[in-house]
Image (cartoon, rainbow, N blue to C red):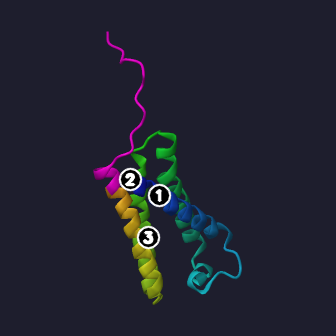
Amino acid sequence: MHVLLWILQFLLGFYFIITGIVHFIVPPGLPKQMAWMYELPPALHLISGSAEIMGGFGLILPGLLRVQTRLTPLAALGLVLIMIGAAFWHFSRGEFINILMNAILGGIAGFIAYGRWRLISLREPTSPLPPNRP
Protein backbone atom coordinates (compact mmCIF):
# COMPACT_ATOMS: atom_id res chain seq x y z
CA MET A 1 0.00 0.00 0.00
CA HIS A 2 2.89 2.33 0.80
CA VAL A 3 4.34 1.85 -2.71
CA LEU A 4 0.94 2.37 -4.35
CA LEU A 5 0.44 5.62 -2.44
CA TRP A 6 3.89 6.84 -3.45
CA ILE A 7 3.22 6.07 -7.12
CA LEU A 8 -0.09 7.92 -6.96
CA GLN A 9 1.52 10.84 -5.13
CA PHE A 10 4.22 11.23 -7.78
CA LEU A 11 1.85 10.87 -10.73
CA LEU A 12 -0.79 13.20 -9.34
CA GLY A 13 1.82 15.62 -8.04
CA PHE A 14 3.50 15.98 -11.43
CA TYR A 15 0.13 16.24 -13.17
CA PHE A 16 -0.97 19.12 -10.94
CA ILE A 17 2.38 20.90 -11.11
CA ILE A 18 2.26 20.84 -14.92
CA THR A 19 -1.42 21.82 -15.07
CA GLY A 20 -0.77 24.63 -12.61
CA ILE A 21 2.04 25.96 -14.78
CA VAL A 22 -0.27 25.85 -17.82
CA HIS A 23 -2.62 28.19 -15.92
CA PHE A 24 0.13 30.81 -15.99
CA ILE A 25 1.25 30.45 -19.60
CA VAL A 26 -2.01 29.33 -21.33
CA PRO A 27 -0.33 28.32 -24.59
CA PRO A 28 -2.21 28.57 -27.88
CA GLY A 29 -3.52 25.38 -29.46
CA LEU A 30 -4.60 23.53 -26.33
CA PRO A 31 -6.66 20.36 -26.96
CA LYS A 32 -10.44 20.76 -27.12
CA GLN A 33 -10.84 19.33 -23.59
CA MET A 34 -8.71 22.18 -22.26
CA ALA A 35 -10.20 25.01 -24.32
CA TRP A 36 -12.01 26.22 -21.19
CA MET A 37 -8.68 27.68 -20.04
CA TYR A 38 -9.03 30.47 -22.61
CA GLU A 39 -12.25 31.63 -20.93
CA LEU A 40 -11.18 31.33 -17.30
CA PRO A 41 -10.86 34.77 -15.66
CA PRO A 42 -7.25 35.84 -14.90
CA ALA A 43 -7.88 35.84 -11.15
CA LEU A 44 -9.02 32.21 -11.26
CA HIS A 45 -5.95 31.30 -13.31
CA LEU A 46 -3.80 32.81 -10.57
CA ILE A 47 -5.69 31.15 -7.72
CA SER A 48 -6.17 27.70 -9.22
CA GLY A 49 -2.74 27.61 -10.86
CA SER A 50 -1.01 28.51 -7.60
CA ALA A 51 -3.10 26.05 -5.60
CA GLU A 52 -2.44 23.23 -8.08
CA ILE A 53 1.31 23.84 -8.08
CA MET A 54 1.46 23.99 -4.27
CA GLY A 55 -0.77 20.92 -3.97
CA GLY A 56 1.40 19.00 -6.43
CA PHE A 57 4.56 19.85 -4.52
CA GLY A 58 2.74 19.06 -1.27
CA LEU A 59 2.10 15.51 -2.47
CA ILE A 60 5.75 14.91 -3.25
CA LEU A 61 8.19 17.04 -1.24
CA PRO A 62 7.24 16.40 2.41
CA GLY A 63 7.63 12.65 2.06
CA LEU A 64 10.66 12.88 -0.18
CA LEU A 65 12.48 15.30 2.14
CA ARG A 66 10.99 13.74 5.31
CA VAL A 67 10.03 17.18 6.61
CA GLN A 68 6.53 18.17 7.75
CA THR A 69 5.09 14.92 6.39
CA ARG A 70 1.68 15.73 7.85
CA LEU A 71 1.29 18.23 4.99
CA THR A 72 0.92 15.48 2.37
CA PRO A 73 -2.64 14.42 3.31
CA LEU A 74 -3.57 18.09 3.69
CA ALA A 75 -2.26 18.83 0.18
CA ALA A 76 -4.28 15.90 -1.15
CA LEU A 77 -7.40 17.19 0.60
CA GLY A 78 -6.79 20.64 -0.86
CA LEU A 79 -6.62 19.12 -4.34
CA VAL A 80 -9.95 17.38 -3.68
CA LEU A 81 -11.46 20.80 -2.93
CA ILE A 82 -9.94 22.24 -6.11
CA MET A 83 -11.47 19.40 -8.14
CA ILE A 84 -14.87 20.05 -6.56
CA GLY A 85 -14.61 23.72 -7.57
CA ALA A 86 -13.47 22.71 -11.06
CA ALA A 87 -16.44 20.35 -11.38
CA PHE A 88 -18.81 23.22 -10.58
CA TRP A 89 -17.06 25.37 -13.22
CA HIS A 90 -17.40 22.65 -15.85
CA PHE A 91 -21.00 21.88 -14.87
CA SER A 92 -21.95 25.51 -15.44
CA ARG A 93 -20.50 25.20 -18.94
CA GLY A 94 -22.02 21.80 -19.73
CA GLU A 95 -18.59 20.13 -20.02
CA PHE A 96 -19.55 16.77 -18.56
CA ILE A 97 -16.47 14.85 -19.74
CA ASN A 98 -14.33 17.29 -17.75
CA ILE A 99 -16.48 16.66 -14.67
CA LEU A 100 -15.66 12.97 -15.01
CA MET A 101 -11.96 13.83 -15.12
CA ASN A 102 -12.38 16.06 -12.04
CA ALA A 103 -14.11 13.18 -10.24
CA ILE A 104 -11.30 10.76 -11.10
CA LEU A 105 -8.54 13.16 -10.06
CA GLY A 106 -10.42 14.16 -6.92
CA GLY A 107 -11.03 10.50 -6.08
CA ILE A 108 -7.32 9.69 -6.40
CA ALA A 109 -6.42 12.71 -4.27
CA GLY A 110 -9.02 11.65 -1.70
CA PHE A 111 -7.57 8.15 -1.63
CA ILE A 112 -4.09 9.61 -1.03
CA ALA A 113 -5.43 11.81 1.79
CA TYR A 114 -7.17 8.85 3.44
CA GLY A 115 -4.20 6.55 2.84
CA ARG A 116 -1.69 8.94 4.37
CA TRP A 117 -3.95 9.86 7.31
CA ARG A 118 -5.34 6.46 8.23
CA LEU A 119 -3.56 3.63 6.46
CA ILE A 120 0.17 4.33 6.17
CA SER A 121 1.35 7.73 7.27
CA LEU A 122 4.64 9.19 6.18
CA ARG A 123 7.00 9.45 9.09
CA GLU A 124 9.71 11.96 9.75
CA PRO A 125 13.06 10.49 10.75
CA THR A 126 13.64 10.27 14.46
CA SER A 127 16.64 11.91 15.99
CA PRO A 128 19.51 9.56 16.85
CA LEU A 129 20.13 11.60 20.00
CA PRO A 130 18.17 10.97 23.18
CA PRO A 131 15.76 13.73 24.21
CA ASN A 132 17.11 16.41 26.55
CA ARG A 133 16.07 15.77 30.10
CA PRO A 134 16.87 18.07 32.99
Q: Amino acid at mark 3?
A: Leu
Viewer-proximal residue, 111 or 132?
Answer: 111
Viewer-proximal residue, 56 or 9?
Answer: 9
Q: Which residue is mark 2?
A: 73
Residue 50 coordinates in the image, percent (x, y): 56, 60
First reached walking from the N terminus: tag 1 or tag 3 = 1
Gap between marks 1 and 3 measured at Cα: 14 Å
Q: Kindly report the secondary structure that dominates the magenta region of the rendered protein.
A: loop
Q: Residue at 47% across / 39% down in the picture?
A: 67
Q: Which residue is mark 3?
A: 105
- The quadrant of the picture occupied by the C terminus is top left
Gap between marks 1 and 2 measured at Cα: 15 Å
Other-residue count near label 2 (Cα within 10 Å), few / some / many at <14 / 14–19 / ≥20: many
The answer to whether the residues at label 1 and label 3 have Cβ atoms under 8 Å apart is: no
SS for dot 3: helix
* Residue furthest right as drawn: 28
Other-residue count near label 3 (Cα within 10 Å), few / some / many at <14 / 14–19 / ≥20: many
Q: Which residue is mark 1?
A: 7
